[in-house]
Amino acid sequence: MLAFALKRLALALLVALTVSIVSFSLLRLSGDLAQALAGPSATAADVEAVRKAYGLDQPLWVQYLAWARQALHGDLGTSFFFKEPVAAMIAARLPVTMTLGVSALLFALLVALPLGILAALKPNSWVDRLALTLSVVGQALPSFWFALMLMILFGLKLRWLPISGTASWKSFVMPAIALGYYGMPTFMRLTRAGMMEVLASDYIRTARAKGLRAPAILLKHALRNAIVPVVAVAAVQLGFFLGGSIVIESVFALHGVGYLGWESISRADFPVVQAIVLVLALFYIVLTLLADLLNAFLDPRIRVG
């Protein structure tokens, strides 16, 4: 297990290094940062002065090493627009995005796992058809449209939930449902397929022949093996929720990291954009690493592979 963990850790560090290089290079190669900072009406002398002031006149690899050295010490630069430390800005917005992402993941799992298990236990039944219908609808509905429908129904018509802000936990109910409903079909299909495969295996038939009770077979033997791919996808899905929440944050006026990224892109605030890309990529990498380790713990065969 230790050797497997070290290999996965080394791979995660290599991916993190690659992401940092690619994100840094793409932002620098996307256009003239000095011209963007100086403004469209700036003269050539003004652009050159900005280029020297921000070190943009140095070779790209020198700029990257300087930025990477600062990033390793927690300094992600200063916002061009807000004139504030980027790390502090992201830290202030991150709790909103984390709360939204985790809430969306919990909603998706709490709905998808029971439906997937019931669909596997009763294939071709009305439960199975209901699960399939929800799966198709979940992937077909645009998230922003679904969010607006929730807002109109539960916020404006019934007045059960607030339609914006982060004043209480109620403010995250509709955003979590709107964001989590899109990821729910994946969990449901994986759970259904995994459970059907495991329930048809020899050791499940042996357990039934020994007289074990159905709940014990289902929870102790079948679900543990069927849940392995769900764990891996859940980690990736949480990273998607964190990085792809910009639409939901905009609709419900949740000022998280996603909304900050949209603001920064529209204002050409490159240090903030670059830092957000790096932070969200690190979340993906760490979550994937944890999922690999948990899967290896649940299924020892993975360690050999």
Image (cartoon, rainbow, N blue to C red):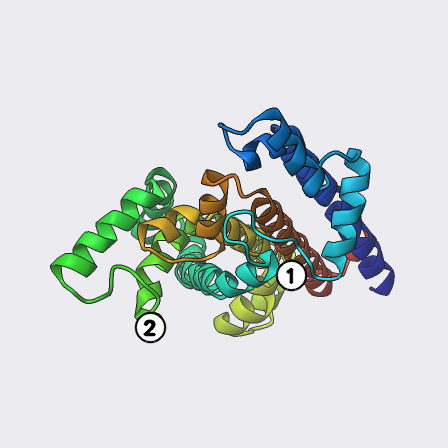
Q: Amino acid at mark 2?
A: Ser
Q: Earlier in the sequence, mark 1 or mark 2?
A: 2
Q: For mark 2, what is the residue?
A: 168
Residue 291 or residue 90, whichever sits in front: 90
In which quadrant will I find the N terminus?
Answer: bottom right
Q: Residue furthest left?
A: 157
Residue 8 or residue 18, whichever sits in front: 18
Q: Residue furthest top?
A: 44
Left or right relative to 59: residue 265: left
Q: Horizontal and vertical percent for residue 49?
A: 66, 36
Residue 267 or residue 211, whichever sits in front: 267
Element carrying mark 1: helix
- Say above or below: 56 vs 124: above
Q: Tag on residue 262?
A: none
Q: Residue at x 41, y 54 (%)?
A: 180
Q: For mark 1, what is the residue?
A: 203
Determine which quarter of the picture holds residue 71: bottom right
Q: Residue furthest right?
A: 3
C-alpha gap between disc 1 and disc 2: 48 Å
Q: Horizontal and vertical percent for residue 12?
A: 75, 52
Q: Is residue 112 visible?
A: yes
Q: Please state which of the two labelled residues, at mark 1 or mark 2, is closer to the viewer.
A: 2
Crowd class of label 1 (few under 14; some 14 to 19; many from 20; radius 10 Å): some
- Say above or below: 268 vs 293: above
Q: Residue at x 51, y 48 (%)?
A: 81
Left or right relative to 24: residue 161: left
Element carrying mark 2: loop
Q: Amino acid at mark 1?
A: Tyr
